[in-house]
Image (cartoon, rainbow, N blue to C red):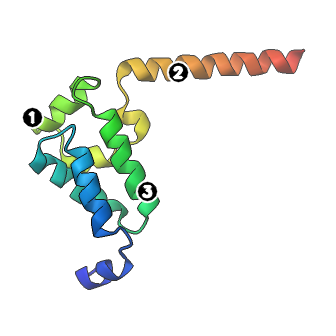
Amino acid sequence: MSIANKELVCIVQKEQREKDQIFLGKNFEFRLSLAIENEIYNQFFKSPEAYINKATSIRNNIHPQKNTVLHSALVAGDISVTFLVGLSVQEMATDEKKKSRASSLKNAFFESRMTEKT
């Protein structure tokens, strides 16, 4: 898609982009937060909802104190910004969060099976 066509279909406003750059800047140094926001924009510029969801997801899941492994890998350059933006919420989760979700799903499954039998 050409730049002109991209600008025509862009519905993520400049103000929202600036807000998200600052928002992401709470977890990343400024240059990295700009690169992340730019990649989010490039992938989700047609859908403001998807754009905002991805920015929020990254901000909440790639926290320097909560997800040190992924945050450190990004800061060190071991993973690219493009790779990061392509991750799902489940893929960004810490190992602890993944175990917690799996346990919740397992419990919900067994509870639903027990309800069916009674």
Residues at discs 2 and 1 in contact (Cβ within 8 Å): no
Spot occupied by residue 88 in the image (x, y as percentages of width and height): 40, 42
- Mark 2 surroundings within 10 Å by alpha-carbon count, few (fewer than 14), some (14 through 19), many (20 or more): few
Q: Amino acid at mark 2?
A: Ala
Quadrant containing the N terminus is bottom left
Checking the image for residue 45, the label placed there is none
Q: Secondary structure at mark 3?
A: helix
Nearest the viewer among 116 and 97 is 97
The CA distance from mark 2 to mark 1 is 30 Å
Q: Which disc is residue 50 wearing?
A: 3
Report x, y in % for residue 6: 31, 78
Amino acid, disc 3: Ala
Q: Examine the rendered structure and indicate whether residue 97 appears above or below residue 12.
A: above
Q: Which is closer to the viewer, label 1 or label 3?
A: 3
> Residue visible at 39% across and 72% down?
11
The residue pinned by badge 1 equals 76
Provide residue 43's location: percent of width, then percent of height: 33, 61
Q: Residues within 10 Å of mark 1 (few under 14, many from 20)?
A: few
The quadrant of the image that shows the C terminus is top right
